[in-house]
Structures are given as C-alpha cells and as structure tokens.
Image: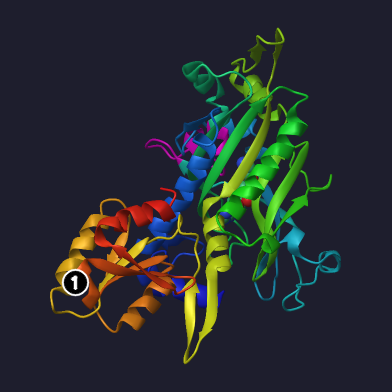
C-alpha cells in the first residue's frame, strides 16, 4: 500500500485533499491521471449498464434531498455505528470492530485503558438549507445515491414508458461521516457510488439477484482483475441490512485483507413501500401482463467507484525484474488506462520531432495521449509503464524512409511496426472506445 500511495502521488493519480494545509482526513483529490482513470471506470460501468442492456435508464439526482427521504429510508433512525472511546489513549473504535472480550471488559485493544460504553453515532453529514440554522432547515448530504433513484421511480417509468422489469442507473457522490476511515481511498468520507436499482415483479427477485450477482462479478473480470483475487460473500441472517432479504458482497483481496467491493442486495419492496407511506404518493405498479397491482421488488447493485479504482490500482501494480533494474508497471486493462498512447521521437533532430508531433495530433482528439521527448527512450518507456500506458509509438530513422513507426506493447514489451496512417486504426482495434 505504501508503494501504491507514493506512486499515486508521484504520478498525479491521487493526492491528499488540502495537502498544503496539512490535509483533511479521509478526503482525496484525483490528479491529471487519476481523473482520466476515474472517467474510464465510470464510462465502463455506464456502458455495461445502459448500453449492454436495453432496459436500464440513467439518472443524475441531486445530492441534497428532502429530509423526509432519510426518515423514510431509515437512515435518520438507523444509519449509525456504535462507537467506543478509550479514556487513556483517546483512540476511537467502531464497537463492532473491537474484539468481544475487550468490549466486555471495557479494555482498549491499543493501550489496555478503559473503554467507554458504546454510543450510537449517525453517519450522515448535516447542513442547513437557507439562511437560518435551526432544526427545521437541516438537510443531509446523501449517504447513498440509491434514494435518488427510488423517489424518481415513477418519473422515470412514466417518462420513458418502461415496463417491469427495468432498471435505473446512477453515478454520483455520497458522503458518510465514517468513524474509522482509512486504507487510502478504501473508506473515505466523500466518495462516489455507481448504483443500479432493478425493479422486478415480487417472486422473481431471487432469480434476478442471481443473474445480477453473476453479471457484476464478470464486470470486474472484464476490467482485467485477477479471478483468484475476487470472491463472493453471502450475508448471513445477522449481517443483512434492515431492508434486505438476501445479499452478496463481491470481495477483493486487498493488501489489508478480503474486503467488500460491491454489494448486491434483494431490497424487496421495502424502499418503495416506505416512500409510499412517508410521501403519500402511491408507488405501486400496474402490471398489464398479469393484470395485477403490486409494489415492485428491487435488486440493487451498489459499487464504489473509488473502491473500484483502488482495486484496479492494487491489482495492476507489478514490479518485474528487468535485468539491471526493477520495472514498475501498472498493468491496467487498456480500456481503463488513463493515457492510451505515448508518442516519442527517438532523437530530437532529423525531422523526427515534427513527425512525432504529427502523430500526437492525429491521436489527441480521440484518445488521451502523451508526448515525451526527454531522456533516453528506455526511460520514457519506464515512465509510461508506471502510468499504465498500454501503447508507445516511437518515430525512428526508418520512419523517415517509409513512414512506419514502432508500437511497443506495455505488457509484452514487444514491438511491431505500423504505418502512420494506421496508428488510429491500431488504437481503435485495441480499445473498446
Ligand atoms: N445503497 C446501498 C449501499 O450504499 P453500502 O454497502 O453501504 O450499500 C455500497 O455501499 C458500496 O459503496 C460499497 O460496496 C463500497 O464500494 C462503497 N462505499 C461505501 N462506503 C464507502 C466509503 N466510506 N468509502 C468508499 N466507498 C464506500
């Protein structure tokens, strides 16, 4: 993890938020390469949801919602973690993460000091809407994007004339005042979710749950994540969230252990029922095929965008023995790599820079590209390896004769020649978009 955090900073992938002020805990900024990586992850997810399926619509709901949404959803009453404080070392723990015997004996797992009784702490960030800061003007920063989808169920269904089963997909920021954030971007207080809520007929929910969990697992494989680092964890009765009838986590083996990457939940009719009760708006559905009215069940796939990025970084980072030195390489799937192609003139003379610029200008409008003419070509390759750039095009003396360039593959380090006129086609053939 230390290597990854320092590489991420050095290469402009992820920076500590407000670093010049000493940083702010559990908030991170995406730098020039990070923002490209993040856009690619979101694009891959958006395509998998809204292009590969003909029954999923998109949505972008506001972060601030009517406060009653969070009463209906159960977050005001129940979105809380139990926390305990050590009276000696002042460390704070989530009570469910402290060994049972320590809790029982009120003994701090860090220093042996006395632990307080567990107190419940709501994880939602509060702010005020309008000029008056009183109880009546409290609003919350959404702790999940899902509720924005539920409250728009009727709007989306009616405007897009959808029939059940259909889904609504959304990518957006969520905020949680986590008690124990950490592990870089694994658990943060501001993060992005990629959530899809699939509305189904009651009784068909188990089937859909199975289908979606397979599909979501395969999505990570398609992004190039190693199979052996992924697994399912099925929630036991004690772990299930208050709204869920069944749930699976997709877990990844991070350097700090197996942890949740995405949750796939059968949320039953809990959410639409609660919003019907609290808003007074009937959220039932009339099914013309069976001539019956029901409140749809919801299968939710809830992925963390930042957590997916951490997974991709951890999974891609390799250190390879390259003779005299160690080659550090981010073996990203080409579709999510921040930079798709780098262009180099072998030397800065003989007309090579002009041709290299010509190639760079051909690629640039279509793919994120990088021009580099400093240092030896070997050094330039290494720099691109570290950034995860899958293809490097080099203009050399043969280019001056036949207008072909070398293209070097990041993973095999093999080179082939392509004609300058075919550079763009080469990238199109090797990239999904
Ligand atoms: N709507 C359901 C829901 O929000 P969740 O299991 O609380 O379920 C879903 O969150 C996903 O969101 C997690 O699997 C994780 O990828 C991501 N996530 C949740 N809390 C996070 C945090 N504090 N920092 C980063 N990602 C987080």
Q: Identify the residue shown where x is 17% and y is 72%.
A: 353
Labels in figure, total: 1
Front-lying residue, 155 or 301: 301
Which quadrant of the figure contains the N terminus? bottom right
Tell whether position 59 is magenta.
no
**Disc 1 secondary structure class:** helix
User: Residue 127: x percent and y percent?
Assistant: 47, 43
Front-lying residue, 12 or 71: 12
Which residue of the protein is positioned furthest toward the bottom in this rendering? 324
Asked which quadrant contains residue 223, the reply is bottom right
Label 1 CA crowd tier, 10 Å (few <14, some 14–19, many 20+): few
Q: Is residue 22 visible?
A: no
Which residue of the protein is positioned furthest toward the front in this rendering? 402
Q: Identify the residue shown where x is 63% and y is 45%.
A: 216
Relative to residue 178, is residue 342 drawn left or right? left
Which residue of the protein is positioned furthest toward the top in this rendering? 291
Front-lying residue, 158 or 338: 338
From this view, report whether residue 80 is shown above or below residue 157: below
User: Residue 364: x percent and y percent?
Assistant: 26, 56
The residue that disc 1 covers is 401
From this view, report whether residue 218 is shown above or below residue 74: below
User: Residue 11: x percent and y percent?
Assistant: 39, 72
């Amino acid at each position: 993890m230390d290597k990854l955090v320092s590489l991420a900073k050095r290469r402009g992938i992820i920076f500590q938020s407000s670093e010049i002020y000493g940083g702010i805990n559990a908030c991170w900024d995406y730098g020039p390469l990070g923002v490209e990586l993040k856009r690619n992850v979101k694009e891959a997810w958006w395509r998998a949801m809204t292009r590969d399926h003909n029954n999923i619509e998109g949505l972008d709901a506001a972060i601030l919602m009517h406060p009653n949404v969070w009463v209906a959803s159960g977050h005001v009453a129940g979105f809380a973690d139990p926390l305990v404080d050590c009276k000696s070392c002042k460390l704070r723990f989530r009570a469910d993460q402290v060994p049972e015997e320590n809790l029982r004996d009120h003994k701090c797992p860090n220093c042996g000091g006395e632990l307080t009784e567990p107190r419940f702490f709501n994880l939602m960030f509060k702010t005020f809407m309008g000029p008056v800061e009183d109880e009546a003007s409290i609003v919350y920063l959404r702790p999940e994007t899902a509720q924005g989808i539920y409250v728009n169920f009727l709007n989306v269904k009616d405007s897009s004339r959808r029939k059940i089963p259909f889904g609504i997909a959304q990518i957006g920021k969520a905020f949680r005042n986590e008690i124990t954030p950490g592990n870089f971007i694994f658990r943060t207080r501001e993060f992005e979710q990629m959530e899809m809520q699939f509305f189904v007929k009651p009784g068909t929910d188990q089937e859909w749950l199975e289908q979606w969990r397979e599909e979501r697992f395969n999505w990570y494989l398609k992004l190039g994540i190693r199979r052996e680092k992924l697994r399912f964890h099925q929630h036991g009765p004690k772990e299930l969230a208050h709204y869920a009838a069944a749930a699976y986590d997709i877990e990844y083996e991070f350097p700090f252990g197996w942890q949740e990457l995405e949750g796939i939940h059968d949320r039953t009719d809990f959410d639409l029922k609660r919003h019907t009760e609290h808003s007074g708006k009937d959220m039932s559905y009339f099914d013309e095929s069976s001539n019956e009215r029901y409140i749809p069940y919801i299968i939710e796939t809830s992925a963390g965008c930042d957590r997916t990025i951490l997974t991709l970084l951890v999974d891609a980072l390799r250190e390879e023995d390259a003779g005299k030195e160690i080659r550090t390489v981010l073996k990203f799937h080409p579709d999510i790599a921040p930079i798709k192609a780098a262009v180099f003139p072998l030397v800065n003379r003989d007309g090579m820079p002009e041709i290299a610029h010509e190639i760079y200008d051909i690629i640039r409008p279509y793919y994120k590209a990088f021009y580099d003419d400093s240092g030896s070509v070997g050094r330039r390759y290494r720099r691109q390896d570290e950034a995860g750039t899958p293809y490097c095009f080099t203009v050399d003396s043969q280019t001056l004769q036949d207008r072909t360039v070398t293209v070097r593959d990041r993973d095999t380090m093999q080179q082939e020649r392509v004609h300058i006129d075919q550079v763009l086609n080469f990238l199109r053939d090797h990239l999904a978009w």
